[in-house]
Image: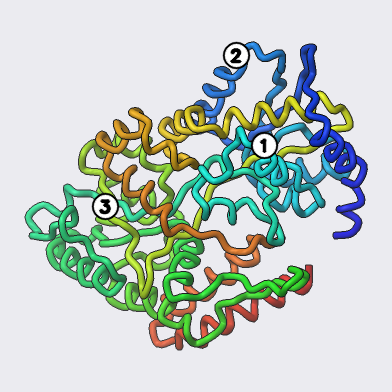
Amino acid sequence: MKRKIALFVATMMTFLAVMGSGVFAQEDVTIEVWYAISGSSGESLLAIIKDFEALNTGIKLKYSFSGGYSDTATKITAALQSNTAPDVLIGGMPAYTGGYGNFYAGEMVKADPEFDYDDVFAGLWDYAMYDGEVCNIPFGISTPLMYYNRALLEGTGIDLENNPPQTWDEFVEVCKELKAYHAGNSHFVPFVVKDRPWLFKTQLRQVGNEVIHANEDYSVKTAAFGSSETAPVAAWWQTMAREELTTVGDHANAENVFLAGMAAFFAGSSTKISAWTEVFGDDLLAIPMPYFTQPAVSLGGNTVSIFPSKDEARTNAAWEFVKFITSTQPNAKFAINSGYLPIRLSALTLPEIQEAFAKNPAYKTAYWQLDHAFSYVNIDSFSALDNAIVNAIDKVTENTSYDPARAMKEAAAEYDLEAEGR
């Protein structure tokens, strides 16, 4: 870590001087912007980038797609080590900035009153932190949402719009009813999920537990889910498998199963709303995520990183651009068109947001989940954490007599061993 921080010392000294000067370039200045958002979401991003260009601020943008998250991680890591990082990265994670000793964006969101730090949902700032300090800015934010296909509930007597299951136990009972009703369809399954680790992390907080524990100075980060208190999470997955209420071993195909009308429920990102509404029409709805003892949803999505330059004008220009795309109107426009959620409280008052809520109630459900959204401590290896979680789920679902408490303890030990070896 000291080596990484050393790479940023020179530019950090420059940005401190910039903050104090308040100088902004009087002539045209060009900044480089990378973005790791593709598909329809990428098109939505380009729309607000072009809105900024139309303002003719004197700031010219050289922007390019940096690849998916994995490719971008590799690319930005190499760029930081060779001192060739862009001015702005849209879609980056805190490890790319805070991990290199760069907390420029975090300082600016608090120093510049035009940004209005308090207008951003408080829980989103945790998602933009590294080792307890804000280093990025929330941007394309999503939560896991419990979608359902209303057409598959017709004739069942189940009224999810007025009486949704609140707890996971109640959810199990609804799934049992649906399984019994569709008993004649051998392809039907009540519930599917592709991103099991994301839902699992949500459930950990729902039993009052953390995902990762860090010591006071964040020098040691360990799994926080090895205690017996987390056993109900693994036990729920085991129940779903034992009662044949979900698929076992074929989760990569979960989206196709739901889109084909063979599953009633799907747990996945709120970004699915835009694309899937075209498939299901009014039949695509969602219920608030069920919980164990307390409501909670784990945040997902991406943030914006700023990399200070030795050129003061470029650093100021980068901040002005980022301040624009994270302001209420542009961010709301991006969110509505992409399926991500607005980051600002003030977005709720916008007519276009209210129209989106009226047009698609699932979007409103996702938005209100931000009230109890959380982010766990940022770590260096998300894949090691997800692998440990998947292994725990597989143990209790492929062998329904496996002790859930043991599976949780083993998963925590597996992650800690992997993290220690990095």
Residue denoted by label 3: 148
The N terminus - image quarter? bottom right
In the image, what residue occupies the spot 59% across and 71% down? 388
Mark 2 or 1: in front is 1
Residue 362 horizontal/vertical position (percent): 30, 45
First in sequence: mark 2 or mark 3? 2
Q: Secondary structure at mark 3?
A: strand
In the image, what residue occupies the spot 21% across and 38% down? 282
Task: Name the foreground residue: 108 vs 186.
Answer: 108
Number of other residues with Cα within 10 Å of mark 1, as a class: few under 14, some 14 to 19, many 20 or more: few
Mark 1 or 3: in front is 1
Residue 246 horizontal/vertical position (percent): 33, 66
Residue denoted by label 1: 112
Task: Name the foreground residue: 265 vs 336.
Answer: 336
* Residue type highlighted by circle 1: Asp
In the image, what residue occupies the spot 23% across and 49% down? 149
* Residue type highlighted by circle 2: Leu
Residue denoted by label 2: 55
* Residue type highlighted by circle 3: Tyr
Asked if one can make out residue 253 in the rendered structure from this viewpoint, the answer is no
Q: CA distance from mark 1 to mark 3?
A: 43 Å
First in sequence: mark 2 or mark 1? 2
Residue 179 horizontal/vertical position (percent): 19, 66
Q: Secondary structure at mark 2?
A: loop
